[in-house]
Amino acid sequence: MASAIMAPVKDGQFVETPSESSLKKADGGKNGMDKDAFLQLLVAQMQYQDPLEPTSNTEFIAQYAQFSQVEALSNMSGSMDLMRASGLVGEEVYIKTTNSAGEIDYVIGQVDYVVYENGKAYLSVNESLYALEDLDTVVDRTYLDAYNKARDWTRKLAKLPSVKGIDLSDGETIDELEKIYNEMNDYEKTFIAKDSAELLNKYVERLKELRKLNGEDQDGTDGEGTGDGEGSGSEEGGTGEGGEAGAAGAV
């Protein structure tokens, strides 16, 4: 069973993909005896039996009956695996694989379809096949989206310098983090650590201070007056020089 057209290469050698590792382990687990192998052994037993103490027909029938029972149980197990695998189509799953070096890795994705071959069920995830026995976790899509959003948000927050070390160039990142957090629903916010949420508030407050010192309003616009340096007087009293309000017009 081929699971990929191209194999990755590292240091000039082909590297076994997670899918290949999963399929190889599944194929290696086929150490049982099928019906053809049993019949061959049965024929060999009849050919080489002791002619002075031949095996009775009753014993042969009993052996075959026992094998038939085992085969029926095996087929039933395979059918149950197929039903279980079919129920996973469309679900988000974690596939746990172990490569030839013994390193454990996880493949995350949606089950697109199921392949049933030689009594075994295989899950198609990210256009590659994996043995059903390597299924580790079935994840709710809402949970996975919330988890990934919180993970990406936390990683971006961790890349910022210390609160006292930020400058105005970090403003765009802090504004974005604040916007994402404010738009999260209550369920998504449960994936954000309390310490991280408090740290964001410290960044926001520090950024406001820096923008105020730079003469910017909270929205980042220039906070200086609109006068031309001469200053403007009251509407009734006209304009005075040097920013002083004229009082000549008052009655």
Image (spheres, rainbow, N blue to C red):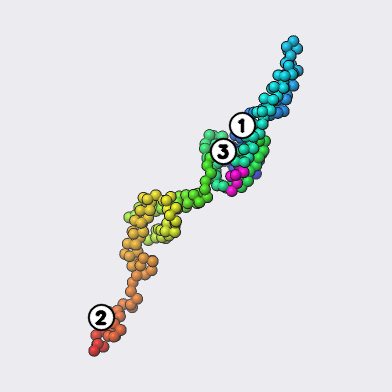
Residue 176 visible here: no
Instruction: Say what amino acid the circle numbered 1 marks.
Output: Gly
**Front position in the image: 176 or 52:** 52
Q: Earlier in the sequence, mark 1 or mark 2?
A: 1
Residue at point 24%, 85% (across, down): 247
**Front position in the image: 217 or 129:** 129
Which residues lie in the magenta part? 85-90
Residue at point 71%, 19% (across, down): 59
Badge 3 density bin: few <14, some 14–19, many ≥20, Cα 10 Å? some
Instruction: Give the side of residue 81 with respect to residue 219, left or right.
Output: right
Q: Are the residues tagged 2 and 3 within 8 Å (C-beta)?
A: no
- Where disc 1 sits, the SS reads loop
Q: CA distance from mark 2 to mark 3?
A: 82 Å
Residue at point 59%, 48% (across, down): 90
Instruction: Say what amino acid the circle numbered 3 marks.
Output: Asp
Q: Main secondary structure of the magenta part?
A: loop
Q: Quadrant of the N terminus?
A: top right
Judge whether residue 228 is colored magenta: no
**Tag 1 residue:** 29
| Quadrant in the picture for residue 245 | bottom left
Residue 19: percent from left, percent from top: 59, 40
Against 170, residue 54 (above or below) is above
Judge whether residue 87 is colored magenta: yes
Q: Quadrant of the C terminus?
A: bottom left
**Residue ranking furthest to the front:** 58
Kindly identify which numbered label has been placed on residue 183. none
**Tag 2 residue:** 244
Instruction: Say what amino acid the circle numbered 2 marks.
Output: Glu
**Tag 3 residue:** 134
Instruction: Give the side of residue 54 with respect to residue 93, left or right.
Output: right
